Amino acid sequence: MTHAEWPLYEVFIRSKQGLAHRHVGSLHAADDQMALENARDAYTRRNEGCSIWVVQSCHLVASQPEDREAFFDPSDDKIYRHPTFYTIPDGIKNM
Amino acid sequence: MIIKAQHQQHFDDRIAADTSIEAKDWMPDAYRQNLIRQIGQHAHSEVIGMLPEANWLTRAPTLRRKAVLLAKVQDEAGHGLYLYSAAETLGCSRQDIYQKMLAGQMKYSSIFNYPTLNWADIGVIGWLVDGAAIVNQVALCRASYGPYARAMVKICKEESFHQRQGYEAVMAMAQGSAEQKAMLQDAINRFWWPVLMMFGPSDADSPHSAQSMAWKIKRHSNDELRQKFIDNTVPQLEALGMTAPDPDLAWDEATGHYRCGEIDWNELYDVIKGHGQCNHERLQAKRRAWDEGSWVREGAMAHAAKRAANAA
């Protein structure tokens, strides 16, 4: 009764021209074309998009939560990358 | 052991700080299992919930109502998908939990074990059943598990049309002939108490409530949500010129809430145990659909394999 499951795809949608594609969810499909059509049916029933990307979930490479500190901490002590690090006299404009 | 204690502490801190837990984050196994149970049950409810309404698709009174109902039933399939996807982020497989539902090992909402006898039932389902679901689901938009909360936000956005189309349909009947009014009152009489039971047992008797509240999966108790629904709904009921089958339903000036009569919990427990009017029929329909659809699933896989081989 139980058969091999259709692979899992992640779905990204551009809601309108000028905006980036954004992750909206996932679905199962037998192949890429079906994934695209199912994504249209499931995730754009109310004109939510003008462009869809689908990619098999197993092809996504992700950072791991347990590596979060080692991975992201290096930017913590570089506050000089933010504009607020610098002191500018009150009267100076357009900066 | 120290590592696990650290993980637990980190998890507890996040829950305390209202920081979402995401799919790959460490979480206690009981939290994971509880979510799989709740989200799975929620997904099954969406999918089983298509059946009572689909029963009236071919007999909708106008083409407009038919198009609307078709869109609503299609939405429920979509909501099932969002929820199965959220459950799968926890490491379970959709097929596995779906099979558990078909085997009667996982539950779905008891409300869908009541039959839809006439068209008025369809309006009442949109108005009351979806209305109750919205109260529940709005509260879940702030659930501590990110993928579940995000699915809820999406579902709530779509679901407000469900309730509005239902109210519009019952309003048409409430303003219709004496027979239509009687049909509507009859539908309200049959659905009123089961809808109140949708929020689950009273807090004291709800087995998962306290832990779910501590984990911030649930933000409000069953009784609080039920009260909110009653307060929302009674004025809508009055505007229709209809009544609830509850002689004790009354406005309580002191608390600023409507008070209702005692709920017959034995009825809910009976339906949960499988003795509702449609338990058997609902599962049979889904088992048949699964079996009869198997050649489609296999065919699609074979087609995909062939196409991949040809492209190589």
Image (tube, coloured by chain):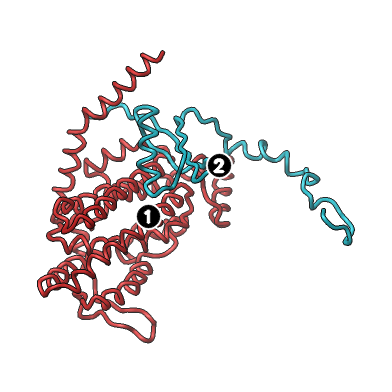
Chain colours: A cyan, B red
Q: Left or right: A69 with respect to B274?
A: right
Residue at image location 41% in from the left, 44% down from the top: B86
Q: Residues within 10 Å of mark 1 (few under 14, many from 20)?
A: some
Q: Left or right: A46 with respect to B293?
A: right
The residue where tag 2 is placed is A20
Q: Left or right: B299 with respect to B137?
A: left
Disc 1 secondary structure class: helix
Amino acid type, callout 2:
Ala
Residue at image location 40% in from the left, 44% down from the top: A43
Between label 1 and label 2, give the one nearer the viewer.
2
Q: Nearer the viewer, residue B194 or B269?
A: B194
The x and y percentages for residue B131 are 32, 64
The x and y percentages for residue B13 are 58, 53
Q: Left or right: A10 with respect to B244?
A: right
Read off the chain for label 2. Answer: A
Cα separation, mark 1 vs mark 2, equals 23 Å
The residue where tag 1 is placed is B158
Read off the chain for label 1. Answer: B
The answer to whether residue B53 is above or below residue A20 is: below
- The image quadrant that residue B251 belongs to is bottom left
The answer to whether residue B18 is above or below residue B74 is: below
